[in-house]
């Protein structure tokens, strides 16, 4: 036992030397447009001490009193401002994915996908697109351990020249449920039980297994979560998946289904359960510390973007439904083509301002990328905007520095809490002929256009029969672990 503890301490001390990519010059980090944008909002706080209103303060170490031992005076606005701001520092944590860590970087394409899409980020190989990637666990609170047996969030925000593209994925290619209407029940079941708030960041409890035992579609995902692949050894050795089926739309208006993958350059490596349990006590910040220290040392984290392309004409060719989020597309049937690389090379300057306030939304797609009819994705498209309004408190969360696109944005949205943009003129509607300030719509064929799909069928609250095989892929995964 003593030898094991010694070995574990050595692992913790030197992990960045053998878990990261070869050492690079930390001073040679290339800045992106997003880095330059964020720099305008960054301060070192080395100026003389002032109030929030810019009034210089002689001291904030003692409150204003009537005599040295007398009562504190209500007029002490310096005390009131300092205490009041402290009282309101915290915002609601995410209802899921509360525990997270993030880093900045860039994405560059290997080869153009012009055959499939018009999206510049997937067609122009000369671009280095800024990215912000947030890793997370799902069930635990912000203070839970990194090494819990849980799904990991893998949320990528790309600040493209055509607007922000968010690929909000996980480290497992499938999900527990097929329809978003079950999501509140799933999370209620996996979260700590409401009578005693136990257990924290753990799926091994009665309510979760009660739900799973009555939800057979969850079997495939359950196999992944309970497998040796579930707990990554490092964020750098963890895969990412878009989970859902999306569409790529080309210049001819043709659509192909697509699945997105992030393949770690270092390969996939996991912790065994005994390691994870010990680390959760010895260093609950194991994963975020590894990423922070590695990037600070110039050992950057890298993934290759892979895509699986499926022509819509082949939609019914396989024994699974391509819209079913509990199924993956077997790579021996539909190969993954690696088309670009993402590199994380800079840590955030402030955890709250960046990692905590970043707002990912599955609806953030750019022209040339569109949604499928996956019923889980369709529900997420509503939920992400709704939860940002609750968590960040205003529809103007897009104006927070970390959420701002690097391209210009203009519309007739106005006012609301914490508005930062000052819109000039009297026109805030369309159509308009006054002043000439109303934002112009993109010309026909330009901008984002939803794919023109013929939809027909009766209005029903039912599930397609093609979604009914809950055990075929679960069995394949089980056998692959043998």
Image (tube, rainbow, N blue to C red):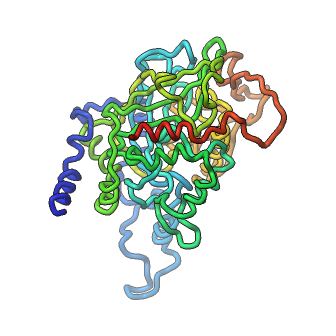
Res 300 → quadrant: top left
Residue 209 to residue 59: above or below: above
Residue 315 in picture, x, y percent from top left: 64, 23
Numbered circles on residues, count = 0
Left or right, residue 118 beside residue 438: left
Residue 179 to residue 47: above or below: above
Residue 460 in picture, x, y percent from top left: 81, 40
Residue 175 in picture, x, y percent from top left: 55, 43
The residue depicted at 59 percent of the width and 55 percent of the height is 213
The residue depicted at 64 percent of the width and 41 percent of the height is 376
Res 299 → quadrant: top left
Left or right, residue 175 beside residue 227: right
Q: Which of 385 and 279 is in front in this view?
A: 279
The residue depicted at 49 percent of the width and 58 percent of the height is 203
Query: In which quadrant of the rendered image does the C terminus lie?
Result: top left
Query: In which quadrant of the rendered image does the N terminus lie?
Result: bottom left
Residue 90 shows in this picture = yes
**Please, which residue is most extreme toward the bottom here?**
69
């Amino acid at each position: 036992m003593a030898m094991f503890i010694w070995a574990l301490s050595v692992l913790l001390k030197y992990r960045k030397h053998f878990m990261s990519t070869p050492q690079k010059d930390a001073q040679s980090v290339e800045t992106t447009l997003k880095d330059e944008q964020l720099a305008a909002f960054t301060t070192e706080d080395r100026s003389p001490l002032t109030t929030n209103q810019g009034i210089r303060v002689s001291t904030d170490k003692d409150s204003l009193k009537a005599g040295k031992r007398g009562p504190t005076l209500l007029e002490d606005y310096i005390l009131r401002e300092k205490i009041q701001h402290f009282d309101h520092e915290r915002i609601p944590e995410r209802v899921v994915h509360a525990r997270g860590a993030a880093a900045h970087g860039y994405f560059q394409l290997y080869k153009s996908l012009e055959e499939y899409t018009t999206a510049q980020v997937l067609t122009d190989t000369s671009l280095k697109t800024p990215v912000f990637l947030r890793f997370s666990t799902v069930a635990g609170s912000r203070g839970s351990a990194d090494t819990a047996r849980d799904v990991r969030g893998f949320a990528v925000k790309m600040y493209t020249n055509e607007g922000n593209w968010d690929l909000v994925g996980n480290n497992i290619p499938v999900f527990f449920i097929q329809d978003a209407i079950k999501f509140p029940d799933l999370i209620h079941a996996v979260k700590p039980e409401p009578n005693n708030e136990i257990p924290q960041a753990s799926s091994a409890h009665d309510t979760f297994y009660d739900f799973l035992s009555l939800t057979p579609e969850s079997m495939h995902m359950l196999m992944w979560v309970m497998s040796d692949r579930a707990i990554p050894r490092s964020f750098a050795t963890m895969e990412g998946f878009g989970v859902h089926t999306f569409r790529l739309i080309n210049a001819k208006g043709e659509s192909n289904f697509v699945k997105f993958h992030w393949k770690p350059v270092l390969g996939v490596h996991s912790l065994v359960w005994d390691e994870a349990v010990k680390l959760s006590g010895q260093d609950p910040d194991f994963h975020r510390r590894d990423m922070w220290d590695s990037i600070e040392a110039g050992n950057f984290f890298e993934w290759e973007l892979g895509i699986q392309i499926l022509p819509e004409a082949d939609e019914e060719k396989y024994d699974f439904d391509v819209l079913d989020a509990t199924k993956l597309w077997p790579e021996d049937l539909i190969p993954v083509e690696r088309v670009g690389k993402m590199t994380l090379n800079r840590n955030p300057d402030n955890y709250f301002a960046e990692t905590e306030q970043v707002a990912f939304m599955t609806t953030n797609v750019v022209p040339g990328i569109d949604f499928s009819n996956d019923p889980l994705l369709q529900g997420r498209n509503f939920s992400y905007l709704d939860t940002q309004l609750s968590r960040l408190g205003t529809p103007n969360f897009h104006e927070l520095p970390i959420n701002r696109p690097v391209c210009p944005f203009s519309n007739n949205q106005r006012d609301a809490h914490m508005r930062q943009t000052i819109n000039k003129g009297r026109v805030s509607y369309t159509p308009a002929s006054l002043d000439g300030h109303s934002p112009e719509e993109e010309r026909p064929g330009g901008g984002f256009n939803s794919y023109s799909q013929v939809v027909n069928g009766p209005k029903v609250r039912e599930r397609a029969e093609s979604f009914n095989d809950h055990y075929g892929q679960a069995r394949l995964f089980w056998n692959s672990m043998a």
